Image (tube, coloured by chain):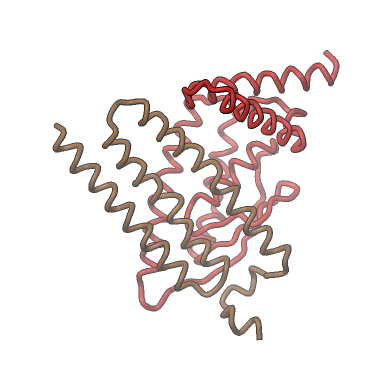
Chain colours: A red, B brown
Amino acid sequence: MSTATKTITRMLVLLVPLVAAWLLWSGIYKPLLLGLGLFSCLLTIYIKYRMEYFETEVFALGFGRRLISYWLWLAKEVVKSSLDVARIVLSPSLPISPEVVKLKASCEHPVDQAILANSITLTPGTLALDVYNGEISVHALTKAGADELRKGEMDRRVLALRKN
Amino acid sequence: MTMLFDILSWVLLTAGGAFVFIGGLGALRMPNLYTRMHAASLTDTIAAVLIIGGIMLQAGLTLATIKLAAILLFLLLTSPTASNALASAAILSGLQPEEGNVEPRERQE
């Protein structure tokens, strides 16, 4: 299969669920809304094309059991660090010790690196500033949060998502 | 049974509201943009989960619950991206994250 055919196939593979989602969720089949839906779907495809999304596999990561168990672990981390940040905000002395940490992402696939960076940002108290060449710079609210990241548990768990 | 769901839903909504308040308070108290973003991220993670969870219990097993679940999923996938865009914009405009403890007003003078 040539590159162009591959790109078009991947675009269609993405377009079908997008159109299905629009039709199912709006439930209103007036020409205006259908037109807007088609426009949104095609705009999404165009933006993804500009992001060079179609040059790698579309469904890079299966929504398998591993991802669900990763989400459960992430949810636990989010709750834990939310309580930490809430305690810091509510304490009168505001005990923060901001720090910038450079982390090496063990995973190589861009989607995995995006998952790792987004997980870091999603956890209150740590914020991914930049991802470049597999290195993530993270702004941590406290030194304890920065040390927690240096242990690299999240990095290991994201790497394990792709192991078969 | 309905009573139980109502109580649970009110607990979730109240806790979510409390986290929104703490997030807002933190955004006011923190010294600079990056630390403010940490406080504000309470609102779009745990507070969003608690509040949407509470509304889902009110909606029961209907299409609305499925839509709310989808909203929650998309919110959790996109809000870190928005935070990254904000942080990148701050870095590009020259606000160094290393100047962590400097008061923003002092910096401008």
Q: Where is B93 relative to A66, above or below? A: below
- Residue A27 image position (x, y, % from top left): 47, 22
Residue A89: x and y, percent?
A: 40, 68
- Seen at 68% across and 70% down, the residue is B95
Residue B32 picture location, percent across and down: 56, 72
Looking at the image, residue B99 sits to the left or right of residue B13; the answer is right
- Could one spot residue A88 in this view of the protein? yes
- For the C terminus of chain A, the quadrant is top right
Instruction: Point out residue B93 in the picture as x, y percentages from the top left corner.
Output: 72, 66
User: Would you identify the image quadrant in which residue A37 lies?
Assistant: top right
In the image: residue A108, left or right of residue B9: right
> Which residue extends farthest front?
A31
* Quarter of the image that includes the N terminus of chain A: top right
At a point 32% along the width and 55% down the height, the residue shown is: B17
Q: Residue at x 31, y 40 (%)?
A: B55
**Residue A164 seen anywhere in this rendered image of the structure:** no
Of residue B36 and residue A127, the one placed in the foreground of this image is B36
Q: Nearer the viewer, residue B58 or A152?
A: B58
Of residue A69 and residue A18, the one placed in the foreground of this image is A18
Frontmost residue, A1 versus A139: A1
